[in-house]
Image (cartoon, grey):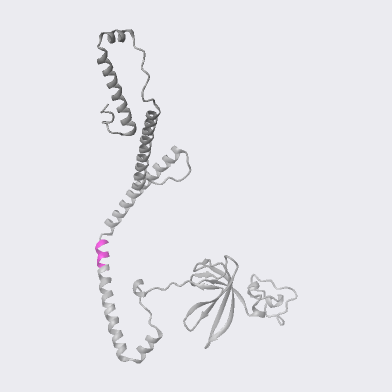
């Protein structure tokens, strides 16, 4: 009886061939086993166990990236085989190799790349430190050291138990009324959502008003301070330009302006007035005008020309 979902050719002889693959002369794993018989290499999917730096272009390759690796047995540690995984870098097609290390229960990079060193202190990370081989051997042979180690472990457990109890009490006090806590969280979420929607609406209105497709971010205190500083700088520059134009106009104007022709009424008043008094008043008026023009243009003291 034929098996389900299998086709047996007409020339298939069960006494000569154990399987259809053997009849066709192919491996059950297909093209992945093309080097298995000649070189002992099997193509598998290998996931990087840690971050590495490529040896060809010095680019980083992250942990968890998967490759079509060539798996090969390269040795033994006692009865445990040592496997080699050879793969091609995705950035520059550079070959690198990673091997198992049964003695230290880890992977090691042997060629073509280097492992990114990410050591940390277990105490800083808040995780228990694993015992080294020397510590384990001393615990097995030294009773006093084993007793001291047990006392230290008990003290650490008591301290951790007190911290865990305090944390649990704080959580229980905060979530004693879970309905009220849920209401508080949902109320806070609705308030933040309304504020966020209002900000987005205002930003879209600004973008539509200025005719841009660039996303406008919400206004911040730093933006307001920068705008005030820019406006103050522009106003100061405008005042400086206005002052410079006034100074330039004073510098370019003649010091003694030509006298206008007197009218008939002024002539009659002049003939009636004393000549010496009218001449003295006109001269003093011209001096006052000259002093005012020079003081505004060059900022000289008003006592200039007082001796004349």
Circle count: 0
- Is residue 42 rendered magenta in the image? no
In the picture, which quadrant includes the C terminus? Answer: top left
Quick one: 141 or 54, which is closer to the camera? 54
The residue drawn where x is 61% and y is 76% is 42
Span shown in magenta: 168-175
Q: Position of residue 13 (x, y in %)?
A: 73, 79
Task: Note whether 170 is above or below 150 in the view shown.
Answer: above
Left or right of residue 22, residue 76 in this image: left
The residue drawn where x is 68% and y is 75% is 26
Task: Note whether 134 is above or below 185 in the view shown.
Answer: below
Which residue is most to the right? 11
Quick one: 299 or 99, which is closer to the camera? 299
Left or right of residue 278, residue 71 in this image: right
Which quadrant would residue 55 be assigned to in this image? Answer: bottom right
Q: Position of residue 179 (x, y in %)?
A: 28, 57
The residue drawn where x is 38% and y is 30% is 251
Magenta region's main secondary structure? helix
Which quadrant would residue 228 be assigned to in this image? Answer: top left
Q: Position of residue 194 (x, y in %)?
A: 35, 46
In the picture, which quadrant includes the N terminus? Answer: bottom right
The residue drawn where x is 59% and y is 79% is 72
Which quadrant would residue 287 be assigned to in this image? Answer: top left
Q: Position of residue 232 (x, y in %)?
A: 34, 40
- Is residue 172 rendered magenta in the image? yes
């Amino acid at each position: 009886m034929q098996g389900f979902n299998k086709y047996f050719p007409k020339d298939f002889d069960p006494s000569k061939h154990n399987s259809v693959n053997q009849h066709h002369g192919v491996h059950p794993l297909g093209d992945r086993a093309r080097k298995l018989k000649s070189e002992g290499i099997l193509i598998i999917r290998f996931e990087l166990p840690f971050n590495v730096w490529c040896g060809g272009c010095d680019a980083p390759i992250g942990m968890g990236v998967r490759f079509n690796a060539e798996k090969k047995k390269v040795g033994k540690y006692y009865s445990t085989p040592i496997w080699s995984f050879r793969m091609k870098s995705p950035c520059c097609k550079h070959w690198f190799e990673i091997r198992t290390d049964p003695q230290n229960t880890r992977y090691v990079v042997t060629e073509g790349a280097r492992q990114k060193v990410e050591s940390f202190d277990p105490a800083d990370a808040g995780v228990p430190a694993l015992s080294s081989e020397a510590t384990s051997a001393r615990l097995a042979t030294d009773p006093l050291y084993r007793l001291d180690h047990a006392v230290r472990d008990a003290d650490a457990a008591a301290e951790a138990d007190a911290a865990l109890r305090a944390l649990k009490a704080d959580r229980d006090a905060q979530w004693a009324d879970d309905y009220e806590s849920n209401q508080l969280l949902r109320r806070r979420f609705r308030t933040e959502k309304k504020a966020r929607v209002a900000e987005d609406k205002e930003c879209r209105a600004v973008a539509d008003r200025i005719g841009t497709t660039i996303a406008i971010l919400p206004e911040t205190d730093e933006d307001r301070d920068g705008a005030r500083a820019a406006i103050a700088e522009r106003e100061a520059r405008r005042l400086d330009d206005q002052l410079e134009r006034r100074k330039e106009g004073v510098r370019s104007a003649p010091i003694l302006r030509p006298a206008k022709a007197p009218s008939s009424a002024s002539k009659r008043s002049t003939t009636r007035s004393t000549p010496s008094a009218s001449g003295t008043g006109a001269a003093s008026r011209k001096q006052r005008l000259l002093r005012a023009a020079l003081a505004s243009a060059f900022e000289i003291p008003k006592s200039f020309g007082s001796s004349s």
